[in-house]
Amino acid sequence: MGVFDLIRGRKDQVVVEDLRPTQGNEKPDINVEQNTVDDHLNNLGRAEKEIEEHPDQVTANTADGVRKAEAVALVWSKPAVYATYAWIWICFFMLALHSSIGSNVLYYAYSNFQDASQVSTATILASIVGGVLKLPIGKILTLWGRAEGLIIFTTVYILGIIILAACNNANSYAAGYVLYWVGYDAIYIILDIFIADTSGMRNRAFAFAFASTPFICTSFTGPLAAANFLKTSNWRWAYGAFAIIMPFVFLPLAGVFKYYEIKARKMGVLQRPVSGRTTMQSIIHYLHEFDIVGAFLLMAAFILFLLPFSLANYGRAQYAEASFIAPLVIGFCLFFVFAAWEKWIARTHFIPYQLFKDRTVLGACCLSAILYFSFYSWDLYYYYFVMVVYNLDVTMTGYMTAIYTVGSCFWSPIFGIWIRYVKEFKYSCLFFALPLMILGAGLMIHFRGSDGDIGYVIMCQIFIAFSGGMLVIGEQMAVMCASDREGIPMMISLVSLFSNLGGAIGYAVSAAIYANTFPQGLRDALPESAKDQWATIYSGGYVTQMQYLPGTPERDAINFAYGYSQKYGCISATAILALAIPCIGMWRHYRVDKEQNKGTVL
C-alpha cells in the first residue's frame, strides 16, 4: 500500500554513504544466495561485474533513458546528489500536500453537481487508467529519459488541476480527476526511479522510505490548509493555486538532470545515438513499442468489468439488470481479446511476460495486488464507520484515518535502516511483517463491532500500518534486486500496476459487500416503528445517520449495520492475506550489499 493510497493508489532519502560490497574479511550469511559472478550470473551479479570492468563508462547496448541516467551519475558531484535529494523530498512534500488538500475539498467541489455519483465512477476510472498507463510510463522513462518523462507528466498533472479548478459539472470534474491522478501517479513513479538511479542497493530501502515521510506532515497540515482555502476563498483556488505553484516544483528537477546530461555530452561520456528512422517510421515504431492497442484493450476490459459494481453500489444499476450484466460480460470477454492480440498480433507485448518467469518478480507483483485488495476491502467505508459508530467529529475522524499514513511512513524508514544493517529483507517480511498484518486484519473482525472499543481499533490500525510500510518496501526491493539497471523503471511500474488493479478489485468487492450487508443489517436491527425508514437512512449517508442521537434505537441499529458490514470486509481482507505467504516465500533471498549503479550515488 502506498501512502496516499488510502484513497488512491497508494504510497514511497536521507544522505548516507553507500558501502562497498562485502569485504573479504566479512563472513557471508549462511543460506543466502550470494549473487556471485559466475557462469550463471543473476542481474545483480552482472551489474556488479559491469561496474568493475567499466566503472567510468556508460553501459553499452542499453536504452537511451538508462544511458542518460548513468551519464548523469558519472559526471555530477556528491554535493549535487545531496542537493538533488533535498529537492526530491520537496517534490514529494508538495505532491503529498496537494493530494491531502484535494481530498479534503473534494466533497465541496462536487456537492452542487446534479449527478455527484459520477465522481465515484471517476475514482475507479482514475485507478484503472492510471494503473494500466504505468507500463507505458515505464517504457517512456527507459526509452526516452527520466527528465523527458517528468516534463510530459507534469504537463498532464497541471492540465488536470486546471480542469478541476474550472469545472462546472460532474463530467468535467471526472475528466480533470482522471488526468490529475494519471499525472500524479506518473510523477510519483518518476521520483521513485530518480531515487533508484541515484542510490546504492544497501541504502535504497531507507531512501525510498524516507521519501514517504512528507506524508506524516501533510496528514495534519493538509486539512488545515484546505480549511483555510475554503474560509478565505473557495475550493477552486485549492486547485488553481497549485496550477501556478507546481511547475516551479517539478521542472527545476528536470532541469538539473538535463543540465548534467548536457555536461556528460560535452565531456564525451554520453554520445547521441542515431536511430536511422524517418519521422513517420519513428511514429510507427513507438506505436508498436508502446502497444497502444493492447493498452486500450486492457483498460477497456478492466473498466467494463469493475465499473458495474460501483454503479450498483450507487443505485444506478441492479445486479439482475442489463446495465449491470452487459458491461460485466463484455469486459470479461475483452480479457480474451487482449490475450489474443498479445499472442498473435502485437509486435511488442504490452505486458512484459518474460519478467514473470522470475519467481521473485511474480511473487512481488502478486503480493502488491493482494495487499491493495486487502486494504480496500475494509478501508472504503472506514471513515464513515468510525465517524458514526464512535460519534466523532470531522477532526477526530481525520486523525483516525491518518493512523495508517503516519504509522507506515514512520515505521518504513526504521525498516530501511534494518535492511541496511542486516542486508536482507525477505525473512523480515515473511516472519514479521506479514504475520503482523494478518493479526491486525484478523483482530478487526472482532473489534469492529458496534460494541467494540475504539482503542482496539487503533491498535489494529497500528499493526496494519507498521506491517504495510515494511511489505511495500520489501516488494519494491525484491523487484529491483531481480532486475538489471535497464529494467528498474518497468519493474517499479509493473508492481504499481498490480497495486492499482488489486485496489480497484478490492474497491469493487468492498462496495458490493456494503451494498448487500448494510441494508440487511439495518432492516434487521431497526425497531418496528422505524423499519420503513431504512431506505432513507441508507441513502442519506452519514449526514442523515448522525441526526439520530447516540443511544436511540435507530442510532444503535445504524451502528450495528456498520459493524455488520465492516465485519465481512475484514473477513475478506484477512482471508486474501493467506495468499501472501507463498508470494513472499517464492522470493529469492537477495543480499543488498552489491552495487547496481555506476557513478556517484548515495
Image: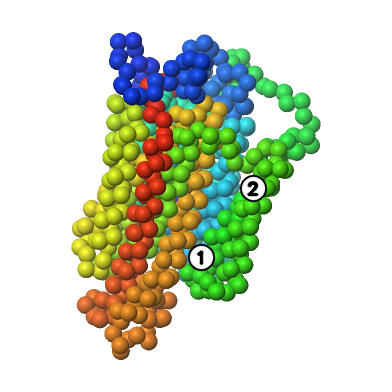
Count neighbours of disc 1 (C-alpha within 10 A) and say few if under 14, some if 14 to 19, many if 20 or more. Answer: many
Give how far apart the Cα atoms at labels 1 and 2 are.
Answer: 24 Å
For the question of whether residue 458 can be seen, the reply is yes
Which residue occupies 37% across, 84% down? 533
Q: Which mark is residue 541?
A: none
Left or right: 329 as drawn, with respect to 515: right
Task: Identify the residue shown where x is 53% and y is 68%.
Answer: 311
- Asked if residue 259 lies left or right of residue 409, the reply is right
Q: Position of residue 208 (x, y in %)?
A: 40, 35
Residue type pointed to by label 1: Phe
Q: Name which quarter of the figure residue 384 lies in.
A: bottom left
**Is there any visible trace of residue 8 in the rendered image?**
no
The residue wearing badge 2 is 339
Q: Amino acid at mark 2?
A: Ala
Image quadrant holding the C terminus, namely top left
Pick whichever of labels 1 and 2 is earlier in the sequence: 1
The image shows residue 142 at horizontal and vertical percentages of 59, 32
Image height of 348 relative to 75, above or below = below
132 w.r.t. 18: above or below: below
**Which residue was labeled with disc 1?**
309
Nearer to the camera, 567 or 277: 567
Residue depicted at x 72% and y 43%:
345
